[in-house]
Amino acid sequence: MPLVKRHIAKSISYRFIGTITTIVLTMAAGLPIKWAGMVGLGELLFKPIIYFLHERFWYQYIKYGLKR
């Protein structure tokens, strides 16, 4: 169970950085802050779940790069 908590913490920190980056890049592309925020919010809601599932899949099934 400790690794699950670690995966959750990594998911949260990764999404924070990713969402801020998305909002800044969306604004740099010319969208108003309201739209950039909506894009960031949508990303914030869905991508942590995808990342967590990806992380757990790698942990359970992909042994690439691990020492035995």
Image (cartoon, rainbow, N blue to C red):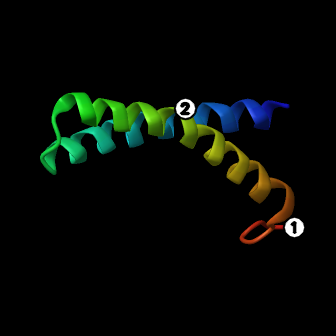
In the picture of the structure, the residue carrying the numbered disc 1 is 68
Q: In the rendered view, tell whether residue 57 sits above or below residue 26.
A: below
Q: Quadrant of residue 17?
A: top left
| Amino acid of disc 2 | Ile
Quick one: label 2, few (<14), some, or many (20+) residues within 10 Å?
Answer: some
Q: In the rendered view, tell whether residue 13 sits above or below residue 28.
A: above
Q: Earlier in the sequence, mark 2 or mark 1?
A: 2
Q: Position of residue 35 (x, y in %)?
A: 26, 34
Name which residue lies at 17% across and 42% down: 31
Q: Secondary structure at mark 2?
A: helix
Q: Position of residue 68 (x, y in %)?
A: 87, 67
In the picture of the structure, the residue carrying the numbered disc 2 is 12
Name which residue lies at 32% across and 36% down: 20
Name which residue lies at 23% across and 28% down: 34
Disc 2 and disc 1: Cα gap in Å?
A: 29 Å
| Amino acid of disc 1 | Arg
